[in-house]
């Protein structure tokens, strides 16, 4: 079955049997446009972090030409995926790139 979320994003439902019970699994099928924008933004974020690990989300948004809220969404998503981590407090903390593919990528160029 396929329904739409409030944002008109397809919501996919799977029905599976688990020990005789029917279990409904739901997941959101994200549009490919978001995926492309996310990949582009994540590369920019990696570059900014590699240049200045103490950079703030506000400084990133100014540098990337995106809203502060959008950058925060990208940062949260990267953290949820285990690609980056923020170590320390809000004022004196710094970003760490955990993603093996991109760690040190810009240093090698």
Image (cartoon, rainbow, N blue to C red):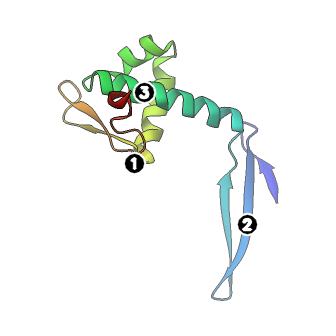
**What element does badge 3 sit on?**
helix
Q: Is residue 73 visible?
A: no
Q: Mark 2–mark 3 contact, CB under 8 Å?
A: no
**What element does badge 2 sit on?**
strand
Q: Which residue is labeled 2 in the image?
A: 14
Residue 65 x %, y %: 51, 12
State whether residue 30 is above or below residue 53.
below
Could you give the CA–CA distance between mark 2 and mark 3, rounded to whole angstroms?
35 Å
Q: Earlier in the sequence, mark 3 or mark 1?
A: 3
Q: Which residue is labeled 1 in the image?
A: 82
Quadrant position of the C terminus in the picture: top left
Quadrant in the rendering for residue 62: top left
Quadrant in the rendering for residue 68: top left
Quadrant in the rendering for residue 24: bottom right
Quadrant position of the N terminus in the picture: bottom right
Residue 42 x %, y %: 48, 31
What's the mark number on residue 45?
3
């Amino acid at each position: 079955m396929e329904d739409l979320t409030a944002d008109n994003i397809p919501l996919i439902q799977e029905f599976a049997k688990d020990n005789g019970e029917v279990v409904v699994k739901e997941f959101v099928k994200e549009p490919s446009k978001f995926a492309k924008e996310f990949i582009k933004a994540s590369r920019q974020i990696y570059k900014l972090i590699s240049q200045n690990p103490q950079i703030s989300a506000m400084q990133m948004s100014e540098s990337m030409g995106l809203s502060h809220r959008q950058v925060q969404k990208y940062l949260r998503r990267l953290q949820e995926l285990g690609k980056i981590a923020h170590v320390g407090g809000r004022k004196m903390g710094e970003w760490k790139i955990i993603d093996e593919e991109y760690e040190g990528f810009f240093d090698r160029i």
